[in-house]
Image (cartoon, rainbow, N blue to C red):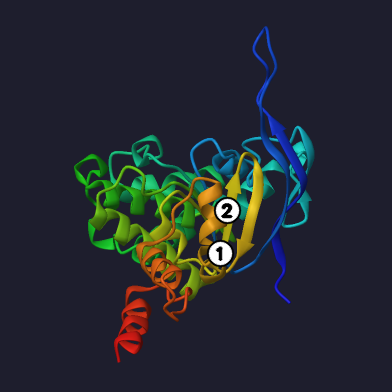
Amino acid sequence: MNHTIIKTEDLHFSYPAPEEGTTPVVLDGVSLDIAEGSFVAVLGHNGCGKSTLAKHMNAILLPSGGTVYVNGIDTSDEDRLLDIRRAVGMVFQNPDNQIVANVVEEDVAFAPENLGVPPAEIRQRVDDALKAVGMYGYREHAPHLLSGGQKQRVAIAGVIAMRPRCIVLDEPTAMLDPIGRRDVLNTIKTLNRERGVTVVLITHHMDEAAQADRLIVMSKGRVVADDTPKAVFSRVEELRQVGLTVPQTTQLLWELRQEGYDVPLDALSDEECAQALYQLLK
């Protein structure tokens, strides 16, 4: 049985109220276990609470109610903050906000230096992290000359260099073009599959969510679905009720089923969908 790396128990959160008026509840009783080594996507509209949930996973925010545990440590334990941040690294939407140095390899070295890692080990970690994201050839380049996708991969390398057990990525492809999005997603999948890094991907892109092992759908601060992407996307009507569409493959198969054709709803990838249509036409 896989060890649980992140656990939330009846997590509630509201941002502080303005002078007058009430404060809206952003998270409304979220209970989740994230297993070490898993690749989990959290999907939902803006304002559903998914980014707020992400920020609880390494104690950027602390619960208004309920508890969050990272590797068994209660995130409200201030004395353990460094242990929590070492276990879970965060990557945000805008790589420009995460890049601090004028040379790629210096940027990746920044976090391990701050953690007090010995210089010889920093060199090893930086090279290792840049190779892991396919950016080793750019180690002496200036980050501001890189494309958005390349910058985001450098930002991910900066987190990997801290050797976290889990990486939480909050809409990491939101500012990228399709090629950058694809490269970042491939990087994330490789880290998960080849290095066993736990990945929590916050996204509003159906096609990104479909690539995870587990998909959590949020609406109005609550978890409304939690299963494999195939199982979740098969619930077309339920997702529509919370204002979410499904991948085009599922949509096509769903419409065929409405017309009485016997096709599987869980043929999620383009290849599986094509195969299902082929069988139907045969």
The answer to the question of whether label 1 and label 2 lie on touching residues, with beta carbons closer than 8 A, is: yes
The first of marks 1 and 2 along the sequence is 2
Residue 37 in percent (x, y) is at 59, 69
Q: Position of residue 217 (x, y in %)?
A: 57, 53
Res 139 visible: no
Q: How many marks?
A: 2
**Residue drawn 53% across the image and 54% down it:** 239
Q: Which mark is residue 262?
A: none
Q: Secondary structure at mark 1?
A: helix
Rendered residue at 33%/74% (across/down)? 270
Q: Amino acid at mark 1?
A: Val
Percent coordinates x, y for residue 234 in the rendering:
52, 67
Tell me which amino acid carries mark 2. Answer: Val
Q: CA distance from mark 1 to mark 2?
A: 8 Å
Q: Secondary structure at mark 2?
A: strand
Q: Is residue 29 left or right of residue 142?
A: right
Q: Which residue position is annotated with label 1?
A: 232
Q: Is residue 59 left or right of residue 156?
A: right
Label 2 crowd bin: few (<14), some (14–19), many (20+), radius 10 Å: many
Please, is residue 36 above or below residue 77 in the view? Answer: below
Instruction: Residue 11: tell me if it is visible.
Output: yes
Residue with the mark numbered 2: 217
